[in-house]
Image (cartoon, rainbow, N blue to C red):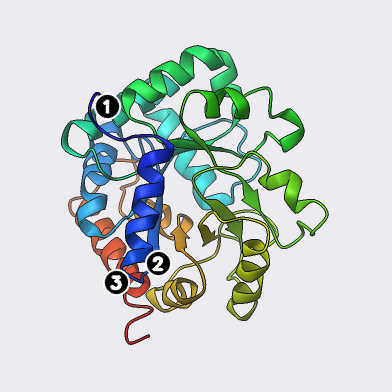
Amino acid sequence: MTGVDSGTARIEQRFNKLASENRAGFVTYVMAGDPDLDTAAAILEGLPAAGADVIELGVPFTDPMADGPAIQLSGLRALKAGVTLRRVLDMVRQFRKKNTETPLVLMGYYNPIYSFGPQAFLTEAKDAGVDGMIIVDLPPEEDAELCLPTLDAGLSFIRLATPTTDDKRLPRVLSNTSGFVYYVSITGITGAAIPDLSQVTGAVERLKHHTALPVAVGFGIKTPEQAAVIGRAADGAVVGSALVTTIAENIDDDGKAKNGLVDALLSQVQGLADGVHNARAGR
């Protein structure tokens, strides 16, 4: 990405811009290749104009232990469509031909990266235009495996913090985190419940005592109203399961995309983004 800020810099610039405008960011999660490569590419291309400030792109995996049913099924559809880690990187390259500004983070599990070869993967990921990664099954105790090489490559390694991450554990979790902190607002798997929004403000404040990084809150956000509450409390709101559910509702019995799938998904994104972006209006 010659001449273009990337990696940690691109994420930092985006959150700095949001802070200067006194608004939270909207972070979208979609699965690469769901329900097929062409439809997924059209969705990915349309997300920034629909209001996505940061994009999390899921890497499908056969054993997604942290994901709820909606994202598990999304990953299975992507695998059936022939999506591999290399094809995910190809999607990022295509996206970067038209968009060099929107931060894009890969979210998934370590096994595909291990099989690819961690150093080879990091080289190709940076070249493709990836800005960071969320790898949910590598704890801080395994930082030498991928986290530290990722940081050395100039990419962000984004950690998850949860309601059960206590003050003793939190510094360890945050020690090599960069880009932003992803606060999981519920315990359990993705999409399993609606977060207790009344507790989000206190949780974000607690995290802010431990880090200067932006805090994005996700898991369980389904409506613009819920997204707006998160937008008042946090630096970003993350929506994933609700989006992949919309994709599932717009495919036929053969798994093919129905006419209007992309428009329906991007319209949903626009509504959620408006909720987040307008959350602090008048403040």
User: Along the horizontal axis of the image, is 6 left or right of 204?
Assistant: left
Q: Residues within 10 Å of mark 1 (few under 14, many from 20)?
A: some
Q: Residues within 10 Å of mark 3 (few under 14, many from 20)?
A: some
Q: Quadrant of the C terminus?
A: bottom left
Q: Residues within 10 Å of mark 2 (few under 14, many from 20)?
A: many
Residue at left offset 43%, top offset 38%: 8
Q: Quadrant of the N terminus?
A: top left
> Which of the two labelled residues, at mark 2 and mark 3, occupies the earlier sequence position?
2
Residue 66's place in the image compared with 133, above or below, is below
Please tell me which residue lies in front, 12 or 183.
Answer: 12
* Residue linked to disc 3: 274
Element assignment for label 2:
loop
Q: Tell me the CA gap for discs 2 and 3.
A: 11 Å
Please tell me which residue lies in front, 186 or 35.
Answer: 186
Q: Amino acid at mark 1?
A: Arg
Asked if the residues shown at circle 1 and circle 3 are in contact, with their CB atoms under 8 angstroms apart, the answer is no
Q: Tell me the CA gap for discs 2 and 1.
A: 27 Å
Element assignment for label 3:
helix
Element assignment for label 1:
helix
User: Along the horizontal axis of the image, is 165 left or right of 258?
Assistant: right
For residue 24, which numbered disc appears in the image? 2
Please tell me which residue lies in front, 116 or 119.
Answer: 119
Task: Place residue 167 in its image quadrant.
Answer: bottom right
Q: Amino acid at mark 3?
A: Asp
* Residue linked to disc 1: 93
